[in-house]
């Protein structure tokens, strides 16, 4: 018997991604950010989330995708971590989607090895492929390029 999981979905550079809903604290529109001098390039800044300072990571940069077009404001997918919330900056927010375990496959071999470890796998949905992010790996930026 297959198990159904729920995913909060979003887009980055035309690719469809999902994170298990229990890892998501909230999804919010664009927030003003304060830049962090000398931080890795994936750290776009800090946002104030109801009095809590949250680091905002650019998912496009983290996954080595193309830069966001000038003037396109990112949205925030706030992920729960042991050290507090972290925001992933994405292009567009999707819906909550349910997927069966039997539609899950390993990450495609065509993925670059530098980002492959951040993708748990993919779900083949009716109309598209959903890349399932390993959110805890994505937010680890100690080795990220500057």
Image: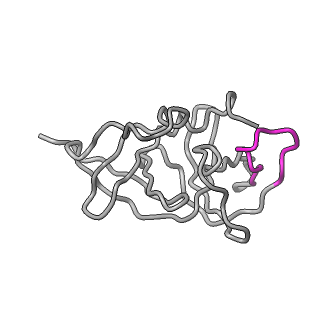
The residue located at (70%, 44%) in the rendering is 42
In the picture, measured across the screen, residue 58 lies left or right of residue 113, that is: right
Quarter location, residue 120: top left
- Is 70 located above or below residue 11 in the figure? below
Instruction: Pinpoint residue 32: horizontal percent, then vertical percent.
Output: 77, 62
Question: 32 or 144, which is in the foreground?
Answer: 144
Q: Is residue 40 magenta?
A: yes
Question: 86 or 128, which is in the foreground?
Answer: 128
Looking at the image, which residue sits at the far right? 37
The residue located at (75%, 47%) in the rendering is 53
Q: Quadrant of the C terminus?
A: top right
In the picture, measured across the screen, residue 60 lies left or right of residue 116, that is: right
Q: Is residue 116 magenta?
A: no
Looking at the image, which residue sits at the far bottom? 71
What's the colour scheme? one colour
The residue located at (50%, 48%) in the rendering is 24
Looking at the image, which residue sits at the far left? 1
Which residues lie in the magenta part? 34-47
Instruction: Pinpoint residue 98: horizontal percent, then vertical percent.
Output: 29, 55
Is most of the magenta stretch helix, strand or loop?
loop
- Is 31 located above or below residue 78 in the figure? below
Q: Quadrant of the N terminus?
A: top left
Looking at the image, which residue sits at the far top? 143
- Is 108 located above or below residue 45 in the figure? above
Question: 10 or 67, which is in the foreground?
Answer: 67
The residue located at (43%, 51%) in the rendering is 18
């Amino acid at each position: 018997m297959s198990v159904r999981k729920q995913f909060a979905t979003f887009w980055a550079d035309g690719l469809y991604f999902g994170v298990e809903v229990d890892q998501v604290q909230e999804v919010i529109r664009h927030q003003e950010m304060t830049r962090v001098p000398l931080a890795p390039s994936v750290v776009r800044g800090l946002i104030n989330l109801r009095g809590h300072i949250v680091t905002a990571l650019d998912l496009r940069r983290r996954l080595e995708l193309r830069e966001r077009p000038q003037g396109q404001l990112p949205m925030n997918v706030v992920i729960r971590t042991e050290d507090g919330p972290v925001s992933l900056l994405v292009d567009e927010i999707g819906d909550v989607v349910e997927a069966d375990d039997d539609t899950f496959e390993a990450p495609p071999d065509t993925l670059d090895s530098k980002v492959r470890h951040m993708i748990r796998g993919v779900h083949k949905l009716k109309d598209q492929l959903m890349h399932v992010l390993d959110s805890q790996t994505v937010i680890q930026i100690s080795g990220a390029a500057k």
